[in-house]
Amino acid sequence: MTTEIDIVVVGAGIAGSSAAAELAENTNVLLLDMEAQPGFHATGRSAAFFAPSYGNAIVRGITAASEHFYRKPPQGFTEVALIHSRDAVFIAREDQLAQLKEMENEIPLLTPLSIIDACAQVPILNREYVVAGLRDNLGGDLDVDAILQGYLRLFRKRGGQLLCKQKVKSLHYNSGVWTLKTDGQSISAPILVNAAGAWADVIAELAGVTKLGLQPMKRTAVLVDPNQSNDSAQNIDISQWPLVVDVDEQFYFKPDAGQILVSPADETPCDPCDAQPDEMDIAIAIDRFEKATSLNINRVNHSWSGLRTFAPDRNFVVGFDPRLSNFFWLAGQGGYGVQAAPGLAQLTNSVITGAKLTKQYSPVLNYRNELAPDRLLDSGHII
């Protein structure tokens, strides 16, 4: 079977699905994914928090440009709220106060918290461990499934086609057209968007160029019951607790459907894969959580791992590859892919089609050169 289209997007996670939806407004787009359902890997395993203070200056800038989309999505995009307000609190031990002060100076929107203030929000914090904090009151929990499904509905409404269980086997460019061979498909398109997440460098090698050095990193999370070690007959009400993050990001925890999600914030380099949790990472998560709080955890209800893929400089990669005609990178989202998706999708659409951006999104154009793959190349080799 041969299908001719304008643009083929490889990877139907949040990056590929959001970009495909925007591109489909004025072009004929085909979206491919090797799994049976979109968002199986990184997107479907995200801790799903919108944090304007999270990440470097570029990440924060694109996140800020994405905020209005989540708070006031386009009419018909969703029937449920995409974001539910929740503070984020960054905590520090005595030996981390310098890092906390540096963070406060870099991000003025954060509010200093005393240990009394921090414990008022999170009563289980250990006062012998935590001495101070910073609060971000502009964040919130993101409904990742509603966001992904909203973009996929918009994509289909605009005439886009989604094909799952289509692993790319080969890539060739000839006479201005990319030809992709998958399981039972031969697909031709002038433009290819590489949004394959942890597999983005694999797609590049199939296209015949050296990798950009994208590195998948495994991150683990567990769910624990907040009442399993509570001596009181009353259940602990955690619903209004903030996301709590160690200032050096050695761990974090937050409420999640009546349980506490805990992560050791691990970044273990690995090959692209269906990531699975490691017992040691689970143990580290529990140990760090117990040291920072008054809870003792004797049972983990659920555990999982996902992949966060970073470029060598830990910035997004968005732009045409100078070594390949019409080969577009949308990769290296790290742990910021969901919160920055609207802005990155708009930037992708603008660079590829020349679409004019609205006032809210126009700031993302300031990062176009800084995110281009050219920065990672030196005469065709990784810097």
Image (cartoon, rainbow, N blue to C red):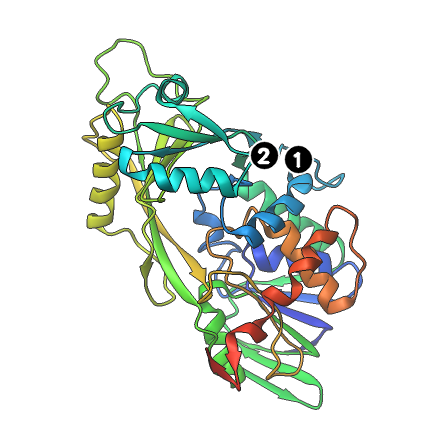
> Splitting the image into 4 quarters, where does residue 64 fall?
top right
- Sequence-first tag of 1 and 2: 1
For numbered disc 2, what is the local secondary structure? strand
Contact? badges 1 and 2 (CB < 8 Å): yes
Question: Residue 133 vs residue 250: left or right?
Answer: right
| Place of residue 277 in the rendered image (x, y in percent of width and height, measured from the top left) | 28, 51
Please indicate whether residue 195 sits to the left or right of residue 288 in the image: right
Q: Check residue 100 in the rendering and tell me which mark sits there, or answer none.
A: none
Q: Which residue is mark 2?
A: 83
Q: How many residues crowd around disc 1 within 10 Å: few (fewer than 14), some, or many (20 or more)?
A: few
In the rendered structure, the answer to whether residue 45 lies left or right of residue 92 reads: right
Q: Is residue 45 above or below residue 35?
A: above
Label 1 belongs to which residue?
71
Residue nearest the viewer, comparing 185 with 312: 312
User: Can you give x and y, in whole percent of width and height, for residue 136 in the image?
Assistant: 51, 32
Would you say residue 256 is visible in this rendering? no
At horizontal 64% and vertical 41% (from top left) the residue drawn is 67
Task: Tell how many labels.
Answer: 2
Instruction: In the rendered view, tell whether residue 128 sits above or below residue 93.
Output: above
- Quadrant location, the N terminus: bottom right
As measured in the structure, the alpha-carbon distance from the residue carrying label 1 to the one carrying label 2 is 6 Å
Where 25 falls versus 125 (above or below)? below
300 above or below 350? above
Residue 309 visible at all: yes
